Amino acid sequence: MILKEKNLLQFEKDLDELHISLSDVQLDQFLTYYEMLVEKNKVMNLTAITEFDEVMKKHFVDSLSLVKVCDLSGSFSVIDVGTGAGFPGIPLKIAFPYLKLTLLDSLNKRVGFLQEVIEKLGLQNAEAVHGRAEDFAKPGKLRESYDLCVSRAVANLSVLSEYCLPYVKVGGKFISYKSDKINIESEGNRTEIEEAEHAISVLGGKLAEQKEFMLPSSDIYRNLVVIEKNRPTPKQYPRKAGTASKKPIVTKM
């Protein structure tokens, strides 16, 4: 048995811990996605992780860990903001094909790659869109159009909330993938979540859950932060490009 076959068995075992079962077609889609990712990574920077077992664990299994906090069995709309190489959106779409998926990224080359993946894998009701999160969340575009927004983007939670919550319908959710560092206190003796709570409220959301866990068969700690949208986001958000990171919504003391 070759190494890839052995590690594919480990991938299936990891997914079994998440109560996810894949068909042979879906497994082939994951393999094709991996091969396309590694090949394209030779000519553009998509990921620092390229070893088969690491991609399976740190990208694919991590993306699918969303099932710990969200029932994905229905046919609802999902937007992945700052998707990069397609995480978590494409793994979610492969495993749960009835999802209606939009992948949003600011780099046109990455979007081109994602469009190739969507076509090659034959993913229906999936699209890759080129643009900044601040621009497409404006009225008349994609604002408050989605049941669920997800993001693995590396940004402070208050900043991510300003980028992501405007896309979510009232009654929907924004779920942020985070590492264990989210629990570390800053100089102001507050964690990243505590510092973001005021911004989340201003943007029409409410912190619903923080799920801390380890990826299956690993020592990798992860967090999923679940934010519920309970009222419309004020029209002035998101602010113009770059403002959210330069001038985050101030946390109440």
Image: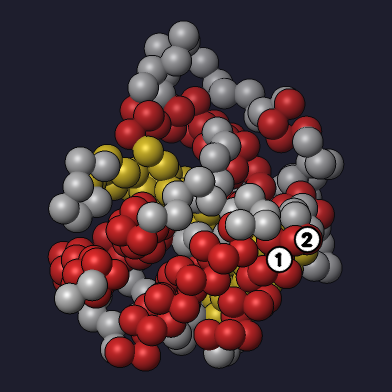
Residue bearing the label numbered 2: 108
Quadrant housing the N terminus:
bottom left
Q: Is residue 96 visible?
A: no
Q: Residue at x 23, y 80 (%)?
A: 21
Per the image, label 1 sits on a secondary structure element best described as helix
Quadrant in the rendering for residue 166: bottom right
Q: Residue furthest front?
A: 2
Quadrant in the rendering for residue 72: bottom left
Q: Residue furthest top?
A: 187
- Identify residue type, mark 1: Val
- Identify residue type, mark 2: Asn
Badge 2: how crowded within 10 Å, few (<14), some, or many (20+)?
A: few
Q: How many marks?
A: 2
Q: Give how far apart the Cα atoms at labels 1 and 2 are.
A: 5 Å
Q: Foreground: 85 or 129?
A: 85
Quadrant in the rendering for residue 131: bottom right
Q: Foreground: 63 or 217?
A: 217
Residue 189 point in image, percent of width and height: 40, 12
Q: Is residue 161 left or right of residue 43?
A: left
Residue 14 point in image, percent of width and height: 20, 64
Q: What label sits on residue 220 in the rendered view?
A: none
Q: Residue at x 41, y 75 (%)?
A: 30
Badge 1: how crowded within 10 Å, few (<14), some, or many (20+)?
A: many
Q: Residue at x 27, y 40 (%)?
A: 221
| Tag 1–tag 2 contact (CB < 8 Å) | yes
Tell me how the rendering is colored.
Answer: secondary structure
Per the image, label 2 sits on a secondary structure element best described as helix
Q: Foreground: 3 or 79?
A: 3
Residue 29 point in image, percent of width and height: 43, 82
Q: What label sits on residue 111 in the rendered view?
A: 1
Residue 213 point in image, percent of width and height: 23, 46
